[in-house]
Each structure stands twice: as structure tokens, then as C-alpha cells.
């Protein structure tokens, strides 16, 4: 039998993703596309008093993209903006019990979607997001 490459946690978040959907009155929305695989991720955050009170996502992506998006929305809820900015793709992958090396780039999609949503929020409140905003070619504008 072929060895299962994914941890139980990855499978759980893939099969039962948390926080799927959209936030109609979101404080920030991030759109990221991976130019290599073509997968797309949209992440919504709600911010109140500098705390992320809600996060949701929609993805047209692979299983690892779904699992990492699900995990990243769980991880940032209740965090301050500064702490959310420290959430790396490695931390997300670790929280999932690891990802196969060929799937690490999918977790980068989740991290960048979060940063893109935070940058969108910063722009709305007139703050400079240039230190962490993903590069334009990675953003997926609709
Ligand atoms: Fe594209 Fe996973 S293969 S995000």
C-alpha cells in the first residue's frame, strides 16, 4: 500500500476545512495566485481594535492549499496584527504536523494571502504596508 504522504491533521483540515466562506464587511481581503500551479486563494479578515476577530477563506486550490488556508484562519483569529504578521508558512505547516516538501509552496500561498489581506486593511486605514505586502506579480486581482 502506498504510504500516506499527509499527516492526519492535514487530512482533517482538507476534509473538514474550517472557516470556509467570505466576510461581506471584511476589514481586508487578500487575493493570491500561484503562477506555477495556477491555484488561487482569497482570504478575508475582520479587524476590531487591532485584533483579528474573524478570518475566512475561499480557494480554488489543491488539498494542501485548503488545509493550510484552514489552519492559517484558525491561527490568526484572536491575534493582534503584529502577531498575525509573524505567522509564517513554516509555522502553519508545523501546526499541521508537516507537509511533504513538494507541497511547502502551497503553505506559502496561505501566508501570502494573509499578508495581502493585512496590507489591504492597512491601506484602508492609511498605513504603509510596503514592508510586508506580497509582490504585485503574486497578487491576483479580480
Ligand atoms: Fe498549487 Fe498546492 S499545488 S497551491
Image (cartoon, rainbow, N blue to C red):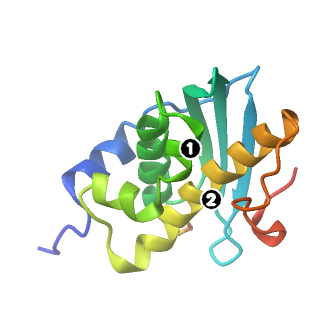
The residue shown at (88%, 38%) is 126
Circle 1 or circle 2, nearest the eye: 1
Residue closer to the observer: 12 or 114: 114
Question: Disc 1 on helix, strand or loop?
Answer: helix
How far from the left and from the top, in percent, is residue 140?
A: 80, 58
The N terminus lies in quadrant = bottom left
How far from the left and from the top, in percent, is residue 119?
A: 75, 48
- Give the labeled residue for mark 1: 82
How far from the left and from the top, in percent, is residue 142?
A: 88, 50
The residue shown at (65%, 26%) is 47
How far from the left and from the top, in percent, is residue 48?
A: 64, 20
Depicted 140 relative to depicted 74: above or below: below
The residue shown at (53%, 34%) is 80
Classify residue 76 as left or right of residue 45. Answer: left
The residue shown at (23%, 58%) is 97
- Give the labeled residue for mark 2: 112
What is the residue that sits farthest to the left in this orientation? 1
Classify residue 107 as left or right of residue 137. Answer: left
Question: Disc 2 on helix, strand or loop?
Answer: helix
Amino acid at each position: 500500500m502506498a504510504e500516506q504522504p499527509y499527516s492526519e491533521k492535514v487530512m482533517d483540515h482538507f476534509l473538514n476545512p474550517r472557516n470556509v466562506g467570505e466576510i461581506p464587511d471584511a476589514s481586508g481581503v487578500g487575493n493570491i495566485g500561484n503562477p506555477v500551479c495556477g491555484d488561487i486563494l482569497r482570504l478575508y479578515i475582520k479587524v476590531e481594535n487591532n485584533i483579528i476577530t474573524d478570518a475566512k477563506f475561499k480557494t480554488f486550490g489543491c488539498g494542501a492549499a485548503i488545509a493550510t488556508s484552514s489552519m492559517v484562519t484558525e491561527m490568526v483569529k484572536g491575534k493582534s496584527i503584529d502577531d498575525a504578521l509573524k505567522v509564517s508558512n513554516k509555522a502553519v505547516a508545523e501546526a499541521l504536523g508537516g507537509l511533504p516538501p513538494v507541497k511547502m509552496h502551497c503553505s506559502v500561498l496561505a501566508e501570502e494571502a494573509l499578508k495581502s489581506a493585512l496590507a489591504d486593511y492597512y491601506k484602508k486605514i492609511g498605513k504603509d504596508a510596503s514592508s510586508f505586502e506580497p509582490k504585485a506579480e503574486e497578487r491576483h486581482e479580480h
